[in-house]
Image: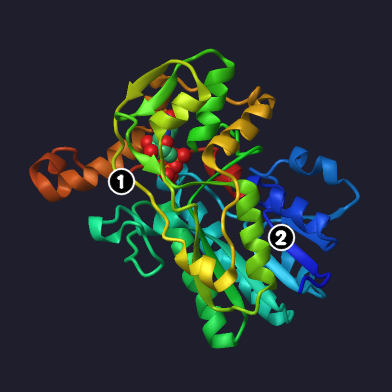
Amino acid sequence: MMQKANVLITGGAGFIASHLVDLLVSQGHTVSIIDNFSTGRRENLLHQEGQVHILEADITDFNAIFSYFAGKDIVFHLAALADIVPSIVNPRGYYASNVMGTMNVVEAARLCGIKKVVYAASSSCYGIPTEEFYPTSEKAPSSPQYPYALTKYLGEKTLLHWGKVYDLAVISLRLFNVYGPRSRTSGTYGAVFGVFLAQKLDGKPYTVVGDGNQTRDFVYVTDVAEAFTVAAFSNVKNEIFNVGTGDPQSINKLVALLGGKKVNIPKRPGEPDCTWADIHKIKSMLGWQPKVSFEEGVGKILEHIDYWKEAPVWTPETIEKATEEWFKYLNGRELSTIHPEKRSDEGSTLRDPLPSGLQDERLGK
Ligand code: UDP
């Protein structure tokens, strides 16, 4: 039932979205993207030159993006600000992109008669689930632990609300830990694969958080791209689906597959010891299931390791500095519950709301 469609991908130059571009182009669809190129990279689309229409614009600017939705059939909404630390430092920027930006996208979609909007939601909405919620189904309670998680969750709520009130067909895909070639390598301390691959290239030890026995539901990026297309071209609407493998892997296992030395760094507050997707719903309603095993996926990423040549090489010292705010705020929250007196001698906790230079960079303006 794969008709040729006119599709629009927000954040099309990003890691996951650029793989979605590849899949949709290979299926013969007409592909357009919107990207502000703040974290998305032109290199991610170079091999598709001439195949993809590009609008350089920011989704926070409704007037700049609205007319681009006209005549499109399907919208894939993947544009967002990612990463935990900058979201703690700059919550306004995250609200602008991930909440207001999402509202702009669904509103433009509604006004232009788009047939389906598929949204890249985040499994971080589950926070730190209690034991009975493993594996974690879409019905598990949500408990975002930091502004990135909250804003992605509010984006999902907005999408579903537009689905309900305006009868816009929408699907929210809650992505677990997506990995694969082109995962971001910006200056921000972020996802584990980018960190470890740059360390491997530089002959530095892998910075393993805690004892490394924590597990993540890592899902390979081409499988994720397929989940988006399956969701878009099915008749199912107004539903949430987990996208993971249901087979979590430990960080120590990742280190063993990559090969090399490791060094342990402190466990971080607000992080679950395990993420584990229950994928029964997407299997049964959309017929999607992952195809790439963890071993295979890590093998494929190693074939493309040169991509990380320019990536920053993190050390325990630079990570400590980069995660200062993370420890300060998320540990502080625990302190204020358990030891309120310790909090009070810190004096005012109001800090510069927008450190210089950050806002411009993160908003891509
Ligand atoms: N991790 C690690 N070393 C690093 C960065 C991350 O051991 O330098 C671990 C981290 O503790 C977590 C996993 O890798 O268990 C995935 O972390 P990431 O930040 O990629 O995703 P998230 O924590 O949001 O699931």
As measured in the structure, the alpha-carbon distance from the residue carrying label 2 to the one carrying label 1 is 31 Å
Q: Residue under circle 1?
A: 270
Name above or below for residue 43 compared with residue 238.
above
Q: Tell me, for residue 9, which label it has, or none.
A: 2
Measuring from the top left, give residue 319's x and y in whole percent: 41, 26
Q: Residue at x 60, y 54 (%)?
A: 224
Q: Quadrant of the N terminus?
A: bottom right
Task: Answer with the quadrant where ligand 1 appears in the image.
Answer: top left
**Circle 1 SS class:** loop
Task: Point out which mark residue 25 bears.
Answer: none
- Residue at 24%, 41% in the rendered image: 331
Disc 2 or 1, which lies upstream in sequence? Answer: 2
**Amino acid type, label 1:** Gly
Q: Residue furthest top?
A: 203
Looking at the picture, the colour scheme in use is rainbow
Residue 32 on image: x %, y %: 80, 60
Q: In the rendered view, tell whether residue 345 sits above or below residue 57.
A: above
Q: Give the secondary structure at mark 2.
A: strand
User: What residue appears at the point 68 percent right and 28 percent down from the top-left corner?
Assistant: 303
Dot 2 amino acid type? Ile
Q: Position of residue 283 (x, y in %)?
A: 53, 66
